[in-house]
Image (cartoon, helix red, strand yellow):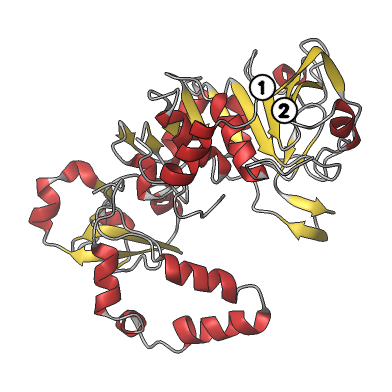
Amino acid sequence: MSEPPYNATELLICSASRLMEDGTTAFIGTGIPMLAAAVAQRLHAPNLVPIFEFGGTGAILETLPLAVGGGCTFHRAVAASGIRDIVETAQRGFVEYGFLGGAQIDAYGNLNTTVIGDHDHPKVRLPGSGGGNDVGSHAWRTIAIMPHDRRRFVDRLDFLTTPGYLTGPGARERAGLPRGSGPYRVVTTLAILGYEPVSKRMQLLATQPGVSVDQVAENTSFELLLAERVTENPAPTQEELRILREEVDAEHLYI
Amino acid sequence: MGLIHVHRADPCGNAQIDGISGFAFEMARACKRLIVSAEEIVDTETIRRRPDRTTIPYYLVDAVVEAPFGSHPGEMCYRYVRDEDQIRSWVEASKEPASTAAFLQTYVHEVRDHQGYLALFGEERLQRLREPAAGRAE
C-alpha cells in the first residue's frame, strides 16, 4: 500500500474536526482539539463556540492557540472569565461537547492522564487531570482523541482520571453525574468508535482509510464490539488539508 | 504563599487583570500570604476609574512589586506575546539534568534581580514581543 498523502496527526485533526457541530459549545483541550476546532470554524462550523479552561468563551480561532491560557483563546471572544466560571458552566449543563486526549482508555471510555505504572512509583508521570475530569463528568458528550494501540486501549487503567461510563450502565448516575451525559466518540489513528447503547461498551463504527476491522481489534486490549454496519471514515479532503497546513498550522508546530 | 502577576496594581495592592483571569481570583483568596507583581504601578485614581477590573483588592495583598515583562517567557494579554524561542530553549534544556542545571544557573540563580533577568534578552527582543500579532487579542 502506498503512503497516504497525510500523516497520523493530520488524520486525527480532520476526523475530530468533522465531529464539531456548528452552533454548539465545545470544551477544547490543549493540542489536537485546538487545531480541529480551528479547521471546523473555517469549514462547516463558523458558529462553533470553543470554551477554554482558563476562561475564554467563543473565540474566533484566527491564530492557533498553544495553551489554554493564551491570548488566542479569547481573541474576539464573547466572554473572558476564569476557571471557576468555566467549570461551573459545564456543571450547569451548558457544555455540549468535550474534546479530550488521554494516555489510556478502557472499554467504558474511562480515561487516564495521570500516571503509567503504580501511582506512588510511576513509570511515567503524566500531566494529570487539568480540566479533564470536569469535562468528562459534566459535558453532555465527550469525545476522546488518541493514537490507537494496545498500550493505550487497555482492559484496566493504571489510574482513573476522568470518568467515562465507569463500570457500565447506571454507574455514572450512581456516582452523581448527570443522566444522559458521557462518552460519545473516540477518534483514533485506526478508527472512529462509539458506545453500544445498552452495555455502554466501546464499539467500532468506522475504520480509518486502508485499515481493516481485524487491525483495530488487534490493537485493542479489550474485547471490541462491532456496530451492525462498520463503515470506512472518508480520508481527509484536499480542502481540509489545505486549510490545516496553510491557514491553521502554517508554522507546522503540530503537524 | 501566593505569587500572582497582574497588568496593573496601585501601591496599596489593588490589582487589575485584563482578559481571562484563570484561577487568580480564587488563589488570591486561598493563600495566607500574597505577593502581587505588576506590569506597572499606577495611582489609586487609575484603579478607581475601572473598579470592575479589580480582581484582587488591597486587603488580600502583603507586597506589591513592579515587574515589567514579569510574565516572560509567557505572555501578558494586550501587552506582549509568548517568547517562543525562549520556551523552546527551555524544552530542549530540560531533556537532560546537566543542561537543565545550566539553564537554571543562567536564567535563575545567576541573575541578581528582575532587571538583570531582562538584560539577558535586551530591549530589542522584548520590543519584538510587544508588537501585535495577527489574530491575538489586542
Q: Which chain carries label 2?
A: A
Q: Where is residue A11 in the image (x, y as percent from the top left)?
A: 63, 37
Q: How far apart are marks 2 and 1 (CA)?
A: 6 Å
Q: Quadrant of residue A82?
A: top left
What numbered label is drawn on residue A78? none
Res. A156 in view: yes
Residue at left 82%, top 60%?
Answer: A123
The correct choice, above or below, for A173 with respect to A112 in the image is above
Considering only order in the chain, which callout, 1 or 2, is on the residue closer to the N terminus?
A: 2
For the residue carrying disc 2, how many other residues have a C-alpha within 10 Å: few (<14), some (14-19), or many (20+)? Answer: many
Q: Where is residue A73 in the image (x, y as percent from the top left)?
A: 39, 42
Q: Where is residue A64 in the image (x, y as percent from the top left)?
A: 42, 46
**Contact? badges 2 and 1 (CB < 8 Å):** yes
Q: Which of A63 and A53 is in front in this view?
A: A63
In the displayed structure, does residue B99 sit left or right of residue A56?
Answer: right
The N terminus of chain A, quarter of image: top right
Q: Name the residue under label 1.
A: A182
Q: Name the residue under label 2.
A: A164
